Amino acid sequence: MAQKYIVNDIVMYKNRIHTIIDISSSNGYKLSYVRHQVSPVRLSGVPLTPEILEKNGWKKEAMSRGVSDRHLVYTKPDIEEYGYFPIYIEKGIGDEFDVYPFTDNHDCKQIAYIKYVHQLQHILFGLGLDSEMEL
């Protein structure tokens, strides 16, 4: 089974939010505030929401072209060295969101589908940016 999470990822375990502290050779995870190793099948992602983005420095933008009232766009000023790197959020049913980072002259060009906080952390980590998130 491929490793899904990395150190510092924010995950859900027993309906509580934790941070991955360490990964064992047997693919178990050591979590914050948990004294035993946890199997990866017992973990789930924390859904990425506009509130989480805002708490972590992402700013809501007013976009008119091709964006309806069901869509939100967030950018993060401190990662401008990568040019325009917005996060596009489409409100789904209930409290669910479809999240896409997009580029290419302000046009939506999906480069990844993101549903959980740890997935955004992986993209930021891969770009060499601060991937720590607060909830």
Image: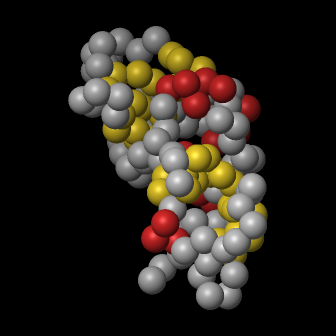
- As drawn, 41 above or below 113: below
Front-most of 119 and 9?
Answer: 9
In the displayed structure image, the side of residue 59 where residue 128 appears, left or right:
right
Give the camera-side residue of 120 and 129. 120
Whether residue 8 is visible to the viewer of this picture, yes or no, is: no
Q: Position of residue 23 (x, y in %)?
A: 69, 75
- Give percent across and percent down for residue 59: 60, 20
Residue 123 position (above or below residue 109):
below
Number of marks drawn: 0
Q: Where 10 sits versus 105, above or below? A: below
Question: Which quadrant would the N terminus be assigned to in this image?
Answer: bottom left
Q: Please provide percent x and percent y for residue 66.
A: 28, 21
> Considering the image in quadrants, where does the C terminus appear?
top right
Look at 61% across and 24% down and name the residue there: 54
In the image, 69 versus 108, the foreground residue is 69
Determine if residue 40 is in view: yes
Which one is in front, 19 or 66?
A: 19
Q: Is residue 124 above or below residue 34?
A: above
Which residue sits at x=58%, y=31%?
Answer: 52
- The extreme left residue here reads 93
Residue positioned 41% across, 22% down in the render? 72
Q: For the point 35% across and 28% down, which residue is it?
A: 95
**Residue 105 at x, y = what percent?**
44, 32
Q: How is the image coloured?
A: secondary structure
